[in-house]
Image (tube, rainbow, N blue to C red):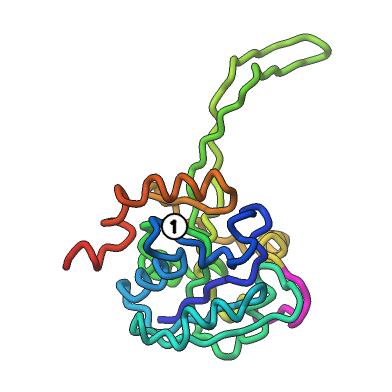
Amino acid sequence: MHAVILAGGRGVRLRPYTTALPKPLVPIGEEYAILDIILQQLHTYGFTRVTLAIGHLSSLIRAFVGDGSRWDLTVDYSEEESPLSTIGPLLTFLDQLPDHFLVMNGDVLTDLNYVSLLDHHITCEAPLTIATYQRKVKIDFGTLETDQGRIVRFVEKPTLSYGVSMGVYAMSRKTLAPYPKNVPFGLDDLVLDLLSRGEKPAAFEFGGYWLDIGRPDDYDEANRSFEARRSVLLPAQALK
């Protein structure tokens, strides 16, 4: 099984932590880099090959991961000369990928079963499958609905729930084949194009642990909760 890890971003929102390190290499629990945890998980779930799509501070990622043998994985690299967004990097090495494969951001901490996601994608024959999570957002204001200048509904500081992308996807090579190489192309572009053609992506709903480490607050939370989550994030180590 083949996984692609998107690790080329500049991590601007996570500064100052990413001033000298690419985001996938920031430490979690003072013991592991995010990327280390992801690679351990992929090996545990039976993946054998990983392609790292890299860009910003790529030499540090190459030095840390090497050929992947530390995780009993075969790792290769695709380096972008200019930012290509989420899907664009995949198009440059699409012919090297199997019919179905996993794609994930290099800054995600989750106990999602990646094999179950990939199996679901293959079974439902979707053009794309997105792992989704219900994110609750607390609104700090009273919300209003109006009709012809009159308030018809009022809710004091509601909590709203949204289905969001986890940054983990199952994809098929034939879905991406029609798109041009070497131009920026994001997940949003792909989803909107598929919807416009009536090819609906599938959702793989997940209710376990998920944290997208995009902001300093998220990073601090990841470190605070790591020891309590160690056994689910690193199941192979828990069995030792």
Which of 9 and 166 lies nearest the eye of the viewer? 9
Residue under the point 66% across and 52% down: 13
**Does residue 106 appear in the picture of this structure?**
yes
Q: Which secondary structure, mark 1?
A: strand
- Where is the N terminus found, in terms of image quarters? bottom left
Q: Is residue 123 above or below residue 58?
A: above
x, y percent for residue 200: 60, 60
Which of 65 and 157 lies nearest the eye of the viewer? 65
Residue under the point 76% across and 72% down: 184
Q: Is residue 199 magenta?
A: no
Secondary structure that dominates the magenta span: loop
Report the side of 240 relative to 14 (left or right).
left
Residue that badge 1 annotates:
109
Q: Is residue 175 above or below residue 226?
A: below
Toward which corner of the image does residue 199 lie, by quadrant?
A: bottom right
x, y percent for residue 234: 30, 63
Count the numbered circles shown: 1
Instruction: Give the extent of the magenta segment.
Output: 176-185
x, y percent for residue 16: 63, 54
- Where is the C terminus found, in terms of image quarters? bottom left
Extreme top residue here? Answer: 150
x, y percent for residue 130: 52, 60
Report the side of 10 relative to 119 (left or right).
right
Report the side of 77 relative to 225 (left or right).
right
